[in-house]
Image (spheres, rainbow, N blue to C red):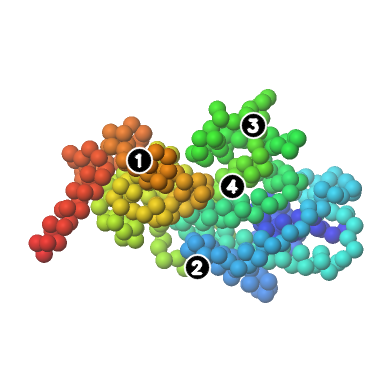
Amino acid sequence: MKPFLPILPFLAKYPFLRVAGRFLEFEFGDLESILRSDDELVSSARELGVRIVEATLKGEKVPELENLKDLKEPFLCEECDVKDCVGRGGDLDRFRFCDYPVHSSEKYIKHLNIAKKFVLAYLFSKIAVSNLSEALRRKFAVRMARIYREMLEGESVGFLKVVVADFGINAKFVDGIFRVDVVDYLRGAVRIKAEEWKLVNRRLERGFVFLSKRELVRLLEEFLRDRLCERVEAGLKLEVKVEHESVDLDVKDLGIKAECYPPCMKKILSDLRNGMNVPHSARFAIAAFLLNIGMSVDDVVNVFRNAPDFDEDKTRYQVEHIAGRRGKGEEYICPSCDTMKSYGNCYADESCSNIKHPVRYYVRCVRSHSKRYSRE
């Protein structure tokens, strides 16, 4: 018997799976035992976990995680004829009792050690993130969920079924299509703002929504973000070196007289940077506003990179359309204040008095600053 054999390569790549907890308990004991351990592997994983958090928050790649993308192993349960393991416990325990016939213990040990390292690193990354602000936790979750999503797109249907079950999603795979219970679909899709994700635009039969493999993985990303945001109460303080404890909008690095942006645009930008799902009306408003005041298409595209559903090709196409480089060639104008109010995107304060358009707010502010500087 080789405990956890089929899932070991996948635990290294996807340590967020609940079975990872059973795996750690089997290999190391309880959480307190792990935290007290002075084992070299545990110490190395602790350092890696913190480094993953720091690099992710900075938008940098971690070589160890990049290498995992090349770890391609078949999901053995898809080809296994031994069924006894299924009856020896619930979903979390069945991998522990694996009876798959293995001829190479060396390969098993290799995968076992890699899984130990990355599951421990994930645990320590969760502990490190738990000590950060809510905004930074959300930022980390958004970016890590996107990394996992990219890897999951290359996995087999058999393994995706395991991930789906891990999140408690009721789904079936029939004739090459995933069918997801409408309640579970709405739990994730409600935060995806693209029009095609609205229930009215989906194929729905007998309480199940039809999804392609790629769409299913996109849905899983939403559930992943929630799990990655969860705190771990471990009584351990791991120092994470980040330049700013808050990721609220810092207008100084946006250029184009960013200190003169109206409150509504600052709020939309802040939400985008924090990885929040901003409605399409707000996305259009900020894109049009930034283009109207002279920002380049490339810079506007970069503004949307933290959006949970960011797709560079689609975003660039839409921004170029707003800029007048697509379609009829007409540049769109930023919505007026009345329109912003009607869509719930207005965050006016006293500085907005007698202003009817965000661009006018910006122009008035820039002129006021210019006059003050000229007097000085």
Classify mark 1: helix, strand or loop. loop
The residue at which mark 1 appears reads as 330
Query: In the shown orientation, is residue 287 left or right of residue 62?
Result: left
Q: Marks 3 and 1, how far apart in space?
A: 38 Å
The residue at which mark 4 appears reads as 221
N-terminal label among 4 and 3: 3
N-terminal label among 1 and 4: 4
Classify mark 2: helix, strand or loop. loop
Answer whether labels 2 and 1 touch (C-beta < 8 Å).
Answer: no
N-terminal label among 3 and 1: 3
Query: In the shown orientation, is residue 137 left or right of residue 365?
Result: right
Q: Inspect the image, locate mark 1, and give the three-letter code of the amino acid beneath it.
A: Glu
Q: Which mark is residue 239?
A: 2
The residue at which mark 3 appears reads as 209
Classify mark 4: helix, strand or loop. helix
Q: Inspect the image, locate mark 3, and give the three-letter code of the amino acid beneath it.
A: Val
Residue at the (14%, 61%) spot, across then down: 373
Which residue is farthest front?
Answer: 328
Q: Position of residue 248 (x, y in %)?
A: 38, 54
Query: In the shown orientation, is residue 349 left or right of residue 3?
Result: left
* Image: 187 above or below 35: above
Residue at the (50%, 68%) spot, across then down: 239
Crowding at mark 1 (Cα within 10 Å: few <14, some 14-19, many 20+): few
Q: Marks 2 and 3, how far apart in space?
A: 44 Å
N-terminal label among 2 and 3: 3
Q: Inspect the image, locate mark 4, and give the three-letter code of the amino acid beneath it.
A: Glu
Q: Marks 4 and 2, how far apart in space?
A: 27 Å
